[in-house]
Image (cartoon, grey):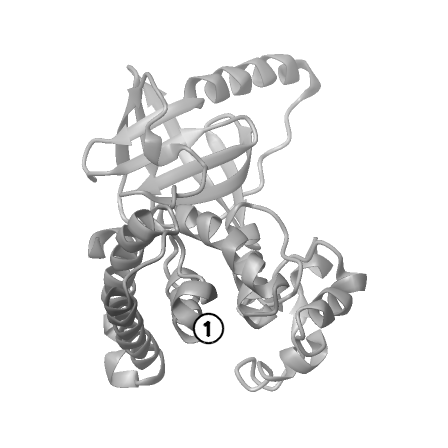
Amino acid sequence: MSSAVSKRLLLLAAIASIVPLSPLRAEDAGAAEASKDKAKNALLGCWESLSEKGYLIRFEPARVVASMEGHLQLYKARYDGGKVFVQMGGQEGTLDTSVTGGELVVKGREGDQRFKRLEQVPEDLEVRALKLGEAVKLEPGRVKKIQDELAARLQRDQAVRTDPTQQDKMGEVDGENTDYLVKLVQEIGWIDTERFGAEAANAAFLIVQHSGHLKLMMAALPPIEKDVRAKKLDGQPYALLYDRLQLNLGEKQRFGSQVGAGANGELVVLPLEDRENVDVYRAEMNMIPLQMYLDFFKEQNGGKEIKFADDAE
């Protein structure tokens, strides 16, 4: 599992800088387009790495889906011959690919990756929520044990993020926490407030938020929203998870909670679905206005105001 966490951005590692394409003469355009279509069609479908166990890629007409031991990544995509232009969460880049003799080669900064074609879509590349177990009533002793375990795991989650001496353990801790929660919720359903209380529910949310496990995030969002709508849980966990999930699905965030590095290295608000009404959405979740939220990031951004990724589109 630790390898899945440390390599869950493996596809991004293969992304090279975007290089402008040279203009074509008009008489060559038709042949070039036919060649591009042929290269794109050769890519479409599912592929399995020949060297990295559990590393899968699926090329679709408008997106690329990658999986490392079940950890999904989705990218919007457009094709130009062997180059695949991909975008996720405000980050853009290209994949340099070729298909020869039925074998796919993805060129990258850390070396080439080779893949064999799969005839069927593996379950790990299916973009759907993790199936949760039935939310049955549990014995008080089991509930207490789960509450204590989640509290301990939350403590470790925060320690590797706040203690500089432990930050190199972040991937390991996130991986262990994710493994634990995935197995647990598949058995007993989501950690809701009705059975486990708000503290345990918040701990489970944070594990999900830091997991990078797309299927788990998709499964957790509806029950978290249910607790929020019932006013049993603060709205912020739902907003944070919603935004991160949307970006991971290749869409835009609603609440403006996700800030990342722009092309020049400065922090930006990652793409918003409705910038004019973002504070309306935030107020519905009892969140402070976006500008007040962004002020907390100014020091991290060298004292500069946080701009919007959308402005660069």
Left or right of 156, for residue 201? right
Please determine whether, in this image, residue 87 is positioned above or below residue 152.
above
Res. 7 in view: no
- The spot of residue 144 in percent (x, y) is 28, 72
Q: Residue at x 72, y 77 (%)?
A: 289
Front residue (pair 121, 304) = 121
- The residue lying furthest to the right in this view is 276
Please determine whether, in this image, residue 52 is positioned above or below residue 183.
above
Q: Secondary structure at mark 1?
A: helix
- The spot of residue 138 in percent (x, y) is 31, 59
Q: Residue at x 59, y 84 (%)?
A: 296
Q: Residue at x 37, y 65 (%)?
A: 207
Number of numbered discs visible in the structure rendering: 1
- The spot of residue 84 in percent (x, y) is 49, 34
Left or right of 21, for residue 305? right
- Per the image, the residue denoted by label 1 is 198
Q: Residue at x 66, y 69 (%)?
A: 285
